[in-house]
Image (spheres, rainbow, N blue to C red):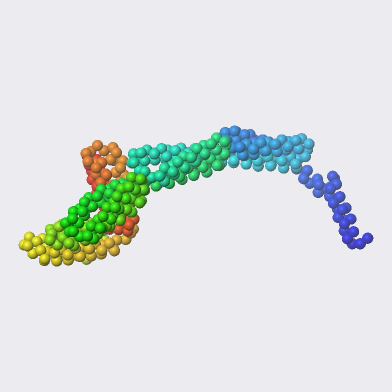
C-alpha cells in the first residue's frame, strides 16, 4: 500500500466519524436551549403581528410578498420546534423575523413614496392649471411652452395609471419627470412673456423712430440713408411677422437690427442738416440728460466724470447764447465739443461700475416690485396700476441692460423702477 492510498483511507474514516449521530461535532448545533428557541419564536410572532398591521395599510406588493415569506418561515420554525430540532427552529424563526422587518421597511418606504407622489402630482397639476390661465391672460404664443405642458400632462397620466397598478416607484419617477417639464414650461413662459412685452414696446418705439427717420431722409435727400431706411423697414416688417407667430427671440433680433439701421440713418441725415442748428441743440440737450441720469445712478462715479459733465453743461449754455446772437458756427463748435465731453464722462463712469453692483441694484428693485405687487392688487388709489406698469417696464429694461453688459443703464433703470415702486406704496398707504 503506497502513501497516497493510505491518505485516502484515513480521510474516509475521519469523514465517517464526523457524520455519526452521536458525534459531538454533529450534536453541537442541537444543544440550543429550548426556552431560548421558544422565546425567539414568540418574539418573532409579535413582530409579524406588527408587520401585518403596517403592511395591511400599504399598496406595496413587495411588502406583502416579504410578509408572506416571513410567515412561511415562521411556520417551519414552529414545526421544527415541535420535533425538538431547536437549532433549525431558531435559525428559521430568526430568518422569519428578518423578513418581517424587511416587509415593514418596504411598507413604510412605499407609504412615503405614495405620499410624495400624491403631493407632487397635485402640485404639478396646479402649476399646469395656473400656467394655462396665465397664457390665456397674457396672449403668449410659444409652441415650445405648449409642447412642454402637453408632455408634462402625459407623464402625469402615465404616473396615475402606474400608481393604480401598484407600481409606486415608477409612478414616482414619472411624476417627478412631469414636475420638471412643468417647471421648464413655467420658466420658458416667463422668459417668453418678458420677450413679448419687450417686443411690443420696442415695436411701438421703432415705428415712431421710423417715421422720424423717414422725415429726415426726405429732408436730406441722402441716397445712402434712404437705402438704410428701406432695409430697416424690412427688418421691422419681419419683426412684426415673427412676433405674430410667437417667435419672440427672432423678433428681438430683427428689432435690434432695425434699430441699429434706423440710428445709423438718423446719424447720416443729422450730418446733412447743417442748416438746422436748433435740432442739433435739442439732440445735445437730450444727450446731456441721459448722461446726467447715467452718472447720477452710479454712487461711485469718479469726480472727473462730474467735472466733465459740468463743463459740457456750461458749453451748451454758451452754445445757446451764441445761437440767440446768430453765431451758428461758434454754437456748432461748442455743441460738438460738449457732446464729446459728455460721451467721455459716460465712458469713465461705465468703466468704473462693477457687474456685482448693477446686479445688486436690479435684484433689490425686483424684490421691492414683488412686495408692491400684492399692495397694488388690493389698492384702489387712482394711478397706482399705471405706475406699477411703468415701473415694470423700467425693470424689464434694467434686466435687458444687465444681460447686455450695460451696467450703468441697468442701474439707472432699476433706480427709476424703485422710485416708482416707493411712490406706489405712498399712494396706496393713504
Q: Nearer the viewer, residue 189 or 421?
A: 189
Using the image, determine if residue 66 lies above or below residue 412. Answer: above
* Residue 95 located left or right of residue 113: right
Q: Quadrant of residue 316?
A: bottom left
Q: Is residue 241 visible?
A: yes
Q: Nearer the viewer, residue 400 or 35?
A: 400
Q: Nearer the viewer, residue 411 or 150?
A: 150
* Residue 300 located left or right of residue 54: left
- Residue in the image at 22% along x and 50% along y: 208
Using the image, determine if residue 11 lies above or below residue 334. Answer: above
Q: Estimate the x, y position of residue 22 in percent, counting from the top left.
A: 85, 45
- Residue in the image at 41% along x and 37% along y: 129
The residue positioned farthest toward the right in the image shown: 1
- Residue in the image at 27% along x and 57% along y: 260
Q: Estimate the x, y position of residue 334 in percent, counting from the top left.
A: 14, 65
- Quadrant where the N terminus sits is bottom right
* Residue 300 located left or right of residue 163: left
* Residue 329 located left or right of residue 22: left
- Residue in the image at 32% along x and 47% along y: 241
Q: Estimate the x, y position of residue 292 in percent, counting from the top left.
A: 20, 58
Amino acid at each position: 500500500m503506497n502513501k497516497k492510498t493510505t491518505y485516502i483511507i484515513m480521510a474516509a474514516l475521519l469523514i465517517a466519524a464526523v457524520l455519526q449521530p452521536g458525534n459531538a461535532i454533529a450534536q453541537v448545533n442541537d444543544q440550543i436551549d429550548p426556552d431560548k428557541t421558544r422565546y425567539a419564536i414568540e418574539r418573532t410572532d409579535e413582530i409579524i403581528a406588527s408587520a401585518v398591521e403596517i403592511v395591511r395599510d400599504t399598496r406595496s406588493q413587495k411588502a406583502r410578498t416579504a410578509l408572506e415569506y416571513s410567515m412561511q418561515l415562521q411556520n417551519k420554525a414552529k414545526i421544527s420546534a415541535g420535533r425538538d430540532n431547536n437549532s433549525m427552529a431558531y435559525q428559521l424563526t430568526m430568518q422569519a423575523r428578518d423578513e418581517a422587518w424587511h416587509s415593514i421597511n418596504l411598507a413604510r418606504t412605499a407609504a412615503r413614496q405614495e405620499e410624495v407622489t400624491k403631493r407632487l402630482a397635485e402640485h404639478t397639476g396646479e402649476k399646469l392649471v395656473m400656467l394655462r390661465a396665465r397664457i390665456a391672460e397674457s396672449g403668449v404664443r410659444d409652441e415650445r411652452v405648449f409642447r412642454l405642458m402637453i408632455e408634462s400632462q402625459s407623464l402625469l397620466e402615465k404616473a396615475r395609471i402606474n400608481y393604480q397598478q401598484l407600481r409606486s416607484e415608477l409612478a414616482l419617477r414619472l411624476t417627478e419627470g412631469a414636475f420638471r417639464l412643468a417647471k421648464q414650461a413655467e420658466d420658458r413662459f416667463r422668459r417668453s412673456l418678458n420677450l413679448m412685452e419687450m417686443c411690443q414696446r420696442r415695436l411701438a418705439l421703432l415705428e415712431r423712430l421710423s417715421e422720424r427717420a423717414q422725415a429726415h431722409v426726405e429732408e436730406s435727400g441722402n441716397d445712402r440713408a434712404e437705402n438704410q431706411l428701406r432695409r430697416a423697414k424690412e427688418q421691422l416688417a419681419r419683426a412684426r411677422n415673427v412676433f405674430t407667430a410667437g417667435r419672440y427671440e427672432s423678433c428681438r433680433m430683427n428689432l435690434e437690427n432695425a434699430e441699429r439701421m434706423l440710428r445709423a440713418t438718423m446719424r447720416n441725415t443729422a450730418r446733412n442738416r447743417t442748416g438746422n442748428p436748433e435740432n442739433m441743440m435739442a439732440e445735445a440737450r437730450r444727450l446731456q440728460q441721459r448722461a446726467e441720469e447715467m452718472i447720477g445712478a452710479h454712487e461711485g462715479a469718479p469726480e472727473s466724470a462730474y467735472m466733465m459733465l459740468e463743463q459740457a453743461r456750461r458749453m451748451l449754455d454758451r452754445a445757446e447764447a451764441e445761437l440767440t446772437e446768430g453765431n451758428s458756427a461758434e454754437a456748432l463748435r461748442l455743441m460738438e465739443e460738449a457732446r464729446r465731453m459728455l460721451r467721455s464722462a459716460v465712458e469713465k463712469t461705465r468703466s468704473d461700475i462693477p457687474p456685482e453692483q448693477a446686479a445688486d441694484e436690479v435684484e433689490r428693485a425686483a424684490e421691492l416690485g414683488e412686495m408692491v405687487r400684492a399692495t397694488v392688487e388690493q389698492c384702489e388709489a387712482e394711478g397706482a396700476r399705471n405706475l406699477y406698469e411703468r415701473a415694470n417696464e423700467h425693470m424689464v429694461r434694467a434686466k435687458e441692460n444687465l444681460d447686455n453688459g450695460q451696467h450703468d443703464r441697468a442701474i439707472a433703470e432699476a433706480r427709476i423702477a424703485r422710485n416708482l415702486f416707493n411712490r406706489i406704496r405712498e399712494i396706496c398707504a393713504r
